Image: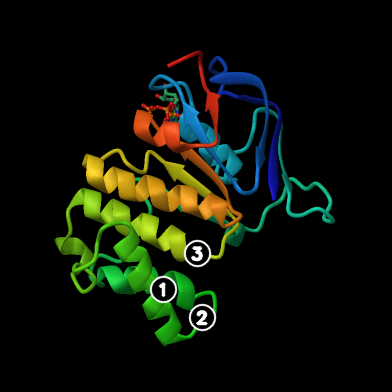
């Protein structure tokens, strides 16, 4: 999997461009940190890559594998998005929220439960498996969303400030989990202000000048 940004320019409405002629390649098995000062367009870039916004000019192209042609269309199931507004089922447990990502992809109930247990443990939520999401803290809900991405078969993971609400220990667990995904072959892009997380990435794309 590869994602190519080709002369990408984006403006909100008729405003001046947030960024112009951005060209960059993202590769599978790689974690890229998108860094830069607040307001330089990191979230917007992730939304463009995830197909939630359309470029003003230029293109976001996907190369699914070595034999598939370059395309500007991506199946939404190929992307796993982690952000502050990722929908969760508040009345269901942490385990059910993670399990559903697998069951919806046809994984058997028992296998999905085991994988969901492991993913929640990886982000430091062992012991909170059966707690309703409405009774978890903001940072814990954020980690449930990360755990869902860990079990998702989607080859692309887009994470928008995944450690923003977390203490150092939890942030480290999330950082290690996301970099493990790229070692398992996924293409991972993380927008972040967290220097520890940026440091753990394989490469960095800086928006709006150096941070
Ligand atoms: N729907 C919108 N309409 C107009 N402007 C917007 C809209 N959404 C975001 N913006 C503006 O676009 C700019 C970039 O926003 P974005 O959220 O992409 O930045 P960011 O680099 O992720 O910021 P932060 O680090 O603070 O999260 C900001 O100035 C923001 O106010």
Q: Which mark is residue 152?
A: 3
> Could one spot residue 87 in this view of the protein?
no
x 47%, y 73%: residue:
102
Q: Is residue 165 above or below residue 132?
A: above
Q: Which mark is residue 9?
A: none
- Label 1: how many residues lie within 10 Å, few (<14), some (14-19) or many (20+)? many
Disc 1 on helix, strand or loop? helix
x 59%, y 53%: residue:
186
- Label 2: how many residues lie within 10 Å, few (<14), some (14-19) or many (20+)? some
**Which comes before the other along the chain, label 1 or label 2?**
2
From the viewer's perspective, tell me whether residue 181 is left or right of residue 127: right
Q: Nearer the viewer, residue 201 or 100?
A: 201
From the viewer's perspective, tell me whether residue 103 is left or right of residue 54: left
From the viewer's perspective, tell me whether residue 97 is left or right of residue 59: left
Count of numbered labels shown in the rendering: 3
Q: Quadrant of the C terminus?
A: top left
* Rendered image quadrant of residue 200: top left
Disc 2 on helix, strand or loop? loop
């Amino acid at each position: 999997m590869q994602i190519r940004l080709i002369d990408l320019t984006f403006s909100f409405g008729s405003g001046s461009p947030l960024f112009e002629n951005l060209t960059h390649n993202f590769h599978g098995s790689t974690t890229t940190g998108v860094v830069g000062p607040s307001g330089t367009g990191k979230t917007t870039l992730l939304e463009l890559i995830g197909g939630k916004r359309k470029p003003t000019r230029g293109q976001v192209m996907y190369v699914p594998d070595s034999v598939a042609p370059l395309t500007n269309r991506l199946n939404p199931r190929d992307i796993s998005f982690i952000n502050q507004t990722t929908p969760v089922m508040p009345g269901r447990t942490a385990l059910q929220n993670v399990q559903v990502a697998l069951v919806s992809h046809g994984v058997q109930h028992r296998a999905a439960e085991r994988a969901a247990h492991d993913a929640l443990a990886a982000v430091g939520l062992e012991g909170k498996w059966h707690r309703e999401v409405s009774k978890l803290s903001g940072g814990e809900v954020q980690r449930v969303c990360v755990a869902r991405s860990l079990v998702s078969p989607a080859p692309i993971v887009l994470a928008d400030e995944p450690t923003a609400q977390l203490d150092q220990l939890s942030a480290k667990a999330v950082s290690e989990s996301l970099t493990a995904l790229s070692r398992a072959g996924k293409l991972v892009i993380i927008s972040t202000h967290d220097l520890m997380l940026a440091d753990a990435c394989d490469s960095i794309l800086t928006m709006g000048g150096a941070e």
